[in-house]
Amino acid sequence: MTHPDRGPGAGVTDVTVAPVAASAEDVATVPGVATVRGTAVRREALHFAVRNGKLVGGFAVVLVFLVAALAGPLFETDDPLAYVGPQAAAPSGEYWFGTTTFGQDVFAQFLHGLRSTFFVGVVAALIAGVLGMVVGFTSGYRGGLVDEILNMITNIVLVLPVLAVLMIIAAYLEVRNVQSQAVIIGLFSWPWVARAVRSQTLTLRAREFVDLAKLSGAPVRRIIFREIAPNMASYLFMVFILLFGGAVLFAATLDFIGLGPTDGTSLGLMLNQAKQWSAMNLGLWWWFIPPGLGITTIVGALYIMNVGLDEVFNPKLRET
């Protein structure tokens, strides 16, 4: 779970992983050795990845939901909010997840809601990840006044009560949709990423291969993206997973309290509507259990994947 005042990555900035990319200090003077070394490291990581039950299991669960999100609406072409069947019908061969009190197909809503969930997670994670990496790399490598200014901006955004800010913004938007929700969540989820990347960059910039790149006259952008970033590839991938899970939870929270999209559907909105029309009191368990279980399963699988990746990339945690 995430702390509402700190963002999706609160409490996880101390994750430490072993670099998976070859550094220039290993192979600076021997032509062709860098490629061989990098290939060997990737093969080793893949070897342990396919044998890690947590990673494989979590990935399989997320993949199943992703396929359902992408392919499901292609078969359920009807409007998920349309009144298509009997009211409050229990699950059956015709309506797999039953219907709402208005005769809406819960299964159709679930499939369309999955697509919205993945869209928000991916877009928000990309926005937050890019912002966090740009600020973190720049701050950690440049240092000095640039570091102080970027740190000040990061700390200001970090201490904002994110959930409260998102609620205020969402409440004042006349038209809310999945796209705007994803952007808003992404713009307020990057500070912990920036701090984590800055910390890693401060460590890596003192390494010999960075000094060699400086002496060779390489520009700052090249040093960051060719020398420093590859050595954090595994860490950045894990950060994306955490951002994804956090964005899904934030979106579900906003939807559940009635500040989600005003058009379309999502898993959080399904929960909101089930609560609003007393589905639990009426015994319509098929209305609120599928979306709640879907959100829980997706986020849980993502975090299990993250644990598995930590075991793959960190030799100390690998299971032989």
Image (tube, rainbow, N blue to C red):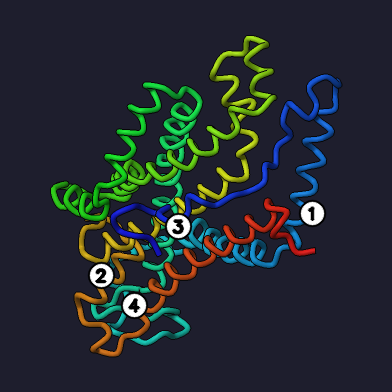
Marks 3 and 2, the one that precedes in the sequence: 3
245 vs 181, nearest the viewer: 245
Q: Looking at the image, do the residues carrying marks 2 and 4 touch, with CB atoms under 8 Å apart?
A: no
Quadrant showing the N terminus: bottom left
Marks 2 and 4, the one that precedes in the sequence: 2
Q: Tell me how far mark 1 sits from mark 2, CA to CA.
A: 44 Å
Q: Looking at the image, do the residues carrying marks 1 and 3 touch, with CB atoms under 8 Å apart?
A: no
Q: Which residue is mark 3?
A: 245
Q: Residues within 10 Å of mark 3 (few under 14, many from 20)?
A: many
Dot in front, 3 or 2? 3
| Residue type pointed to by label 4 | Phe
| Residue type pointed to by label 1 | His
x and y percentages locating residue 116 in the rendered image: 39, 56
Marks 4 and 1, the one that precedes in the sequence: 1
Dot in front, 4 or 1? 1
Determine the residue positioned at 41% across, 75% down: 290
Determine the residue positioned at 54% across, 33% down: 201
Marks 1 and 2, the one that precedes in the sequence: 1
At mark 2, the secondary structure is helix
Q: Which residue is mark 4?
A: 288
At mark 3, the secondary structure is helix
Q: Which residue is mark 2?
A: 272
Determine the residue positioned at 55% across, 59% down: 67
Viewed as shown, does residue 237 lie left or right of 114? right
